[in-house]
Image (cartoon, coloured by chain):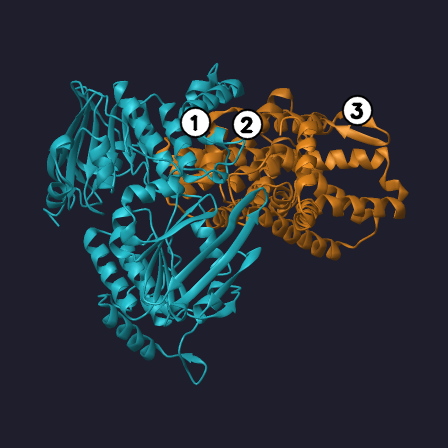
Amino acid sequence: MDQNVLLKMVDITKTFPGVKALDHVSLTVEKGTVHALMGENGAGKSTLMKCLFGIYGKDDGHIYLNGEEIDFKSSKEALDNGVAMVHQELNQALKRSVMDNIWLGRYPKIAGIAVDERKMYKDTMAVFKELEIDVDPHRIMSTMPVSQRQMVEIAKAVSYNSKVIVFDEPTSSLTEEEVEHLFKIINMLRDRGVGIIYISHKMAEIKRISDYITVMRDGQWVATERAEDLEMADIIRLMVGRELTNQFPPKTNTPGETYLEVKNITGMYNHLKDVSFSARRGEVLGLAGLDSSGRTESLESIFGVRTRKEGEVYLDGKRCLNRNPGESIKNGFALLTEERRATGIFSILNIRENTVISSLKRHLRFGLWLSDKSQREDTKRYIDALRTKTPTQETKIRALSGGNQQKVIIGRWLLTEPDVLLLDEPTRGIDVGAKYEIYQLILDLANKGKTVIMVSSEMPELLGVCDRIVVMSGGRVAGEVDARNTTQEEIMTLAAKYV
Amino acid sequence: MANPIANLQRISAEYSQMDKKDKRRFWTDGILNNALYILMLAFCIYTAIKQPNFVSWGSLGNLIVQVAAYLPMALGIAGCIVLTGTDLSAGRVCGLTAAVTGVFLQKSDFANKMFTSLPEVNGWWIAVTLLTVIAIGALIGLVNGFFVAKFSLHPFIVTLSTQLITYGIILWFFALNGNNGQPISGLSAEYKDFVGGELFRLGPARIPMYVLYAVILTALMWFIWNKTSFGKNMFAVGSNAEAARVSGVNVFWTTVLVHTLAGAMYGYSGFVEGYRAGSIAASTGLNYECDAIAACVIGGVSFVGGTGKISGIVLGVVILRIIFIALTMLGVDSSSLYIIKGAIILCACSLDMRKYLVKK
């Protein structure tokens, strides 16, 4: 067994001021196995990997690669020694071509001076062929979808002849089909004897692909088991440290009369075509579909972020123009965006400033100045109501965890007193415990008679929280199902209708 | 933040729990984050020893006068920096409005009066002039803001263009009515009184009226930045424009207004600069924006966007002025002055960026 051990991390400890991020964590990866690393956000998975790659210096502990102790100072050094990582947030030179990205930092040279473009092309094609990736090496990165860019990243790792490859949440932006392709590649790498560390939140995937599972919690190692010995419920229990009997809160809302009607929306600059649906008061309506099926575009078109070529939005029978977000807010709409970092938070500003920005009118006195007192009160009210964990209101929002950031943004929208909430992936990148709280919040809103439209890529979540689910495919509405008596298979079939 | 004593207690409690490595980190961080102020202090002490005159009512008065002159432009430009932009047109706008002020307020019996048909200078006419130059500044700011917001151009490009255009207008203005590029002088006594009349004396130094105006403008800007929706929106746009748009902030108008307000401040600066220059030439106002930008950066208005305080800007202007006064007293020649100014900006920016870099 010992000679099969490829990578061994022993007693890794890392402290940040005030926080013990890693507390004597150990991890062993064998040749030709997929080792899943699981844990809630903040459990220390990323920190452990950053210690491996030398992005953080570890305080204590040892790392062995093939029995030799190593201490990488940079990811470049790690790469040169056959340890690669496919990042969750892709760090690529987007304006450059595919092959430029793959050979970045080690361009093949002619006579040690000129870059050998031809060799680069040939080598890139060889790797792509091996991995069955169909991408033109000359293509510019920014013109490709995220999934293909990820494939390029994997190809890069393979081109280094890596012995250990770390995948960090690789499937979060992939379609089912692309996930299949990825798994094929991973299986191929495994058969070649590569050791794979696979970080993901998605239980079903983990069960399918991995041989071993290591669970971490609060910076500590909790368990390492063979994958077949663990049931999904066991993993969740190990991750949260408590029995999570129900993933979803009980549904208590009762939908009323039809409230929101979306009629024949066709996009000006996107592929939306003739999208129509309606939602009732007190209803949670799900929007399901594959990536780029037009779910996000639909929400953004309703909210006036994207330009509509045709189509109307009616609230209670009255037409809402919703030409821009400001107008939509006035009409009682709220949009929680998908990319929290890019379009949600003001990272440099504090919790209070992040909370009140959409409802400044509430604090206006004599039409002239804003009352600090009422801003503080509003912020406090929503920190308490949503149980946001933060030391003070003046804490910068970037210091919070993803779940707490999301709560702050939800608070921002609730302060605008919306009637229709458009939630785009409300639980993305949020840990299991916080997810439950968000679900409960959604149901509470529905109970108050609000209309909630929710986009999610996690099918169980839609089934567990929604009343009805509209399935989109290729920019069109493919069908509508009742969440109580449908199956994931039925939704998937609809989702593939116009692909 | 609220209570400095409680804050100190908290820090000392945290400090006592740190290990040796963290303690060292604490001190290096503390020193580097405040390096500018520490160096300032050391420099002031050095100057005071070399030139005891440096610590006197007279030089304090001199400092106040200079700060009051340079502060309004910095207050305007700071808004542009909060939006992660900049404004290169500030100095030229100041020059143009100074020239307009001069022409409007020349003595009626002055031999070389450019426009003899202009009315007698009185309180009303001064007010009209002030509003006119503020409007001119605001108009150029509006153009800047419009192109930045409408076409998503980088403010560097837009304001570089308006800088050149404004300079062209200045040259053209100085050639009007057969003036042939001559400096504008012969300013009326009423105007000189209004801007430079004595407010009070500080030892040997005369504190002019425009110090009072600067105080009023600073208070007004503080109010706009901290107490109005416009101010909040400005910080939101500077922090994350896309998120601001989705949150219902009108990014277009916020950007336009920030630049317009900045332009209005340059217009006012020109009004005061006319008095300070006494004789206004086409080169008046040249490179003034450099000092203003430097002051903002030293005062913690970061190019990262979304951060900055009025108090910081005031402090930045004060620090920059102290340095210049001290260097002048030490007899440093003007060429070295430029080198030192450049070095200070570079140093301040590096120390500032250090705070925003994600530590790894």
Is residue B110 rendered to the left or right of residue A493?
A: right
Q: Which residue is mark 2?
A: B226
Residue A115 image offset from top left, x and y in percent: 40, 77
Colour cyan belongs to chain: A
Point out residue B71 in the picture as x, y percentages from the top left corner: 65, 36
Chain letter of disc 1 in the image? A
Q: Which residue is mark 1?
A: A387
Disc 2 crowd rating (10 Å Cα; few below 14, some 14-19, many 20+) is: some
Q: CA distance from mark 1 to mark 3?
A: 56 Å
Q: Quadrant of residue B296?
A: top right
Instruction: Measure the alpha-carbon separation of dots 2 and 3.
Output: 31 Å
- Give the chain letter at badge 3: B
Question: Which of the two discs, 1 and 3, sits closer to the camera?
Answer: 1
Task: List x then y, in percent, for residue B266.
Answer: 58, 37
Residue A191 in which image quadrant = bottom left
- Residue drawn at x 28%, y 25% is A443
Q: Are marks 1 and 3 in contact (CB under 8 Å)?
A: no
Residue B192 appearing in the image = yes
From mark 2 to mark 1, how far is it between C-alphas? 28 Å
Looking at the image, the residue that sits furthest to the bottom is A111
Amino acid, disc 1: Arg
Q: Nearer the viewer, residue A492 or B164?
A: A492
Using the image, tell me which numbered label, if any, was put on residue A451: none
Circle 3 — which element?
Answer: strand
- Quadrant position of the N terminus of chain A in the picture: bottom left
Residue at 37%, 69% in the rendered image: A4
> Disc 3 residue type?
Phe
| Nearest-to-viewer mark from 2 and 1 | 1
Q: Are marks 1 and 3 on the same chain?
A: no
Residue A416: horizontal and vertical position, in percent? 36, 23
For the residue pair B256 and B360, the one nearer the viewer reads as B360
Question: Which of the chains is orange?
Answer: B
